[in-house]
Amino acid sequence: MEYTKELHEFWDNVLSKATGFTVLNNVDADSIKPLLSEITRLQSLTQWVGVEDRLPIMFISVILLTENGIVGEGKLSMIDIDTGTPCFDWENGLTATNVTHWMPLPEGVK
């Protein structure tokens, strides 16, 4: 998202009407751009990726989510040659079944 004067004025107007405050007054658009870039970067790191959309790199630890709502650290261990089904293992070595989504580990944890 690119921060423009029009976007600034739009949000200033919306927030002013909703809260009675002019929240974004005196904000320099150039000072906001790096913040918006960092927000976009962080959002991309915290979004679940569907295994139907993309698989993680094999043998690299990621956070897994199963259809039963179980969340934990695991790895893509193989892809079944016959069915094309991805196979995941939890960090304790047990097979993770019905994995629907994954996301990268936060940088500090790797």
Image: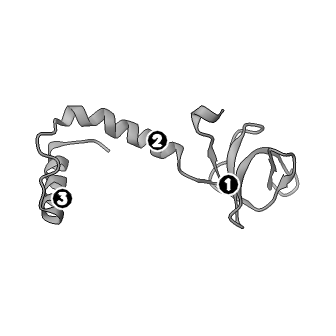
N-terminal of the pair, mark 1 or mark 3, is: 3
**Marking on residue 42:** 2
Q: Earlier in the sequence, mark 1 or mark 2?
A: 2
Q: Amino acid at mark 1?
A: Val
Q: Which residue is mark 1?
A: 51
Which residue is disc 3 drawn over?
15
Marks 3 and 2, how far apart in space?
24 Å
Q: Quadrant of the C terminus?
A: top right
Q: Position of residue 6 (x, y in %)?
A: 15, 48
Q: Residue furthest bottom?
A: 68
Residue 99: image x %, image y %? 73, 58
Three-letter code for the amino acid on which mark 2 is drawn: Leu
Give the left or right position of residue 104, taking residue 91 as reference: left
Instruction: Give coordinates of residue 85: x percent, y percent.
Output: 80, 56
Q: Is residue 22 above or below residue 66?
A: above
Residue ID at (13%, 59%)? 16
- Label 1 sits on a secondary structure element that is loop
Dot 3: within a 10 Å radius of its alpha carbon, few (fewer than 14), some, or many (20 or more) residues? some
- Which image quadrant: the N terminus? top left
Res 104 quadrant in image: top right
Q: Residues within 10 Å of mark 2 (few under 14, many from 20)?
A: few
Kind of element beneath mark 2: helix
Q: Image height check: is 40 above or below 66?
A: above
Quadrant in which residue 33 is drawn: top left
Instruction: Say which residue appears at 84% left-offset and 58% top-offset.
Output: 83
